Image (cartoon, helix red, strand yellow):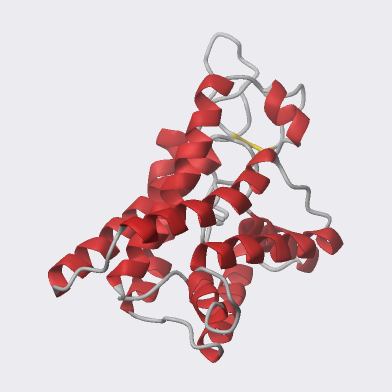
Amino acid sequence: MSTNALPGPVSRDRTTPAPAALLDLGPVAQLRAGRLGRRVPQLIVGLVLYGVSLALMVRSTLGLAPWDVLHSGLIRHVPLTLGQAVVAMSFVVLLLWIPLREKPGIGTIANALLIGTSADATLFLLSAPDGLAARVALLLLGVVGNGLATAMYIGAQFGRGPRDGLMTGLARRTGWSLRAVRTGLEVTVVLCGLALGGALGLGTVLYALAIGPLTQLMLPWMLVRLDPPAEPTPEPTPEPTTGR
């Protein structure tokens, strides 16, 4: 996540529609905020697409996102599929939210369950291609698809994913910048993943460089405008490391 903000607080001028803002809402407020007919399908499609994009990167064999380097290393030592490792690690990360006093939303739990499930389903259906050009195409589709998926699920305004919540919670508790916390977390999980035998490649570098700008570009298109509470608290536009 970054400190580059979307359009600011909701305007008090009722004659001019206020720009959409990313709001920090609890689970009940998320449901009461309305527009569920768009937000719920967007959340589900975004999370499923996220798992598909992860699987595309896996099948490219050219490198994974930082957290997925850790997941790919973990499954070398425990009897789990990659998707199951994503789900298991999501709930481990959620335990770290407790001392940070982060509050999960509806999208947080959906994130933890759906991404790994859709990743495993896609990996079951999709085989790795033989040619380098096809592998590069899968990698690029995976990275771009991941940016779109992240913008979709965040824009649905149902809360952060487990890993993004860990990042924002650490930033708030330590006083460090989001960028510094993001870098520290990514380096840590990559090193742990490599120690476990995880898959690191050029795709990891591409993902790290591209996912923030891609999400930042696409989020305004996907951000659902809500009717906020009386005193809304807009958040900065996130630049998630994983969208999770």
Question: How many callouts does the rendering have?
Answer: 0
Q: In this orientation, does residue 6 appear?
A: no
Q: Nearer the viewer, residue 6 or 154?
A: 154
Q: Residue at x 57, y 63 (%)?
A: 84
Q: Nearer the viewer, residue 234 or 126?
A: 126
Q: Residue at x 86, y 63 (%)?
A: 99
What quarter of the picture does the N terminus occupy? bottom right
Choose top left, top right, bottom left or bottom right for residue 208: bottom left
Q: Nearer the viewer, residue 123 or 236?
A: 123
> Residue 161 location, x and y as percent?
62, 52
Position of residue 91 in the picture relative to residue 22 (left or right) = right
> Residue 152 location, x and y as percent?
46, 40
Position of residue 102 in the picture relative to residue 222 (left or right) = right
Q: Residue at x 68, y 56 (%)?
A: 165
| Furthest residue toward top | 15
Q: Residue at x 72, y 35 (%)?
A: 25
> Residue 204 location, x and y as percent?
39, 74
Q: Measured along the vertical axis of the image, is residue 98 above or below residue 67?
A: above
Choose top left, top right, bottom left or bottom right for residue 98: bottom right
What quarter of the picture does the C terminus occupy? bottom right
